[in-house]
Image (tube, grey):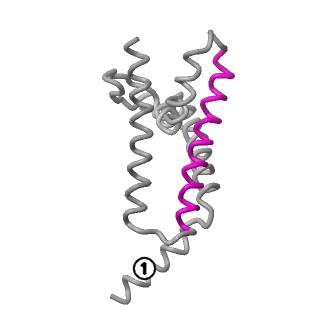
């Protein structure tokens, strides 16, 4: 029992003090890693990931897949807003999606930081998970409705 407590305390040292910065830095690190993996794809062409998304099967280099997966919140939020605008160039669209994803991860970290300051109960964590799940499901629903229309 004492060894388990020591392991838990040593693991607690590695937890970040500020989740806002940690989530944002992990997102940026993931984007850089995705770019590096995309460059590696030029030398290793078998470095491909296949997936199914919204009933569409596609194969893409692993680095691009990582970037797409990490930027999914930005695609869901900013993509729905950008779909209402007339045709814009891809560079501003890409920047808007990346900034929106970064803001999403920053806000998730901010919520976790606020909850850490308070006494966290199991019901509070459950409410937070339910709200986040409903928010993401709402964004998926908006995306699907726009695809149908």
Q: Residue furthest bottom?
A: 2
Query: Residue at (41%, 30%) from the top-left corner?
Result: 140
Asked if residue 104 lies in the magenta stretch, the reply is: yes
Give how far across and how far down residue 60 sits, in percent: 43, 26
In the displayed structure, does residue 57 sit left or right of residue 28? left
Q: Is residue 89 above or below residue 97?
A: above
Give how far across and how far down residue 71 sits, in percent: 53, 35
Q: Pointer 1: what residue?
A: 7
Corner quadrant of residue 48: top left
Query: Residue at (44%, 40%) from the top-left corner?
Result: 135
- The overriding secondary structure of the stretch rendered in magenta is helix
Query: Residue at (41%, 16%) from the top-left corner?
Result: 147
Corner quadrant of residue 124: bottom left
In the displayed structure, does residue 61 sit left or right of residue 104? left
Q: Is residue 88 above or below residue 78?
A: above
Q: Secondary structure at mark 1?
A: helix
Q: Which residues are magenta?
A: 89-116
Q: How many marks?
A: 1
Asked if residue 101 lies in the magenta stretch, the reply is: yes
In the displayed structure, does residue 30 sit left or right of residue 92? left
Q: Nearer the viewer, residue 15 or 45?
A: 15
Q: Is residue 142 above or below residue 17?
A: above
Query: Residue at (33%, 22%) from the top-left corner?
Result: 57
User: Which class describes the residues within 10 Å of circle 1: few (<14), some (14-19), or many (20+)?
Assistant: few
Picture quarter with the C terminus: top left
Picture quarter with the N terminus: bottom left
Give how far across and how far down residue 14 sits, in percent: 54, 70
Give how far across and how far down residue 106 sits, in percent: 61, 48
């Amino acid at each position: 029992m004492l060894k388990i407590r020591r392991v838990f305390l040593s693991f607690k040292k590695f937890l970040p003090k500020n989740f806002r910065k940690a989530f944002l830095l992990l997102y940026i690190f993931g984007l850089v890693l995705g770019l590096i993996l995309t460059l590696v794809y030029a030398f290793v062409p078998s470095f491909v990931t296949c997936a199914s998304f919204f009933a569409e099967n596609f194969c893409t280099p692993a680095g691009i897949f990582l970037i797409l997966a990490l930027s999914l919140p930005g695609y869901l939020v900013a993509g729905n807003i950008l779909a209402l605008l007339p045709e814009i160039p891809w560079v501003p669209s890409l920047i808007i999606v990346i900034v929106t994803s970064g803001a999403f991860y920053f806000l998730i970290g901010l919520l976790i930081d606020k909850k850490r300051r308070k006494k966290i109960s199991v019901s509070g964590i459950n409410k937070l998970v339910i709200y986040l799940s409903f928010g993401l499901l709402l964004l998926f629903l908006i995306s699907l409705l726009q695809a149908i229309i």
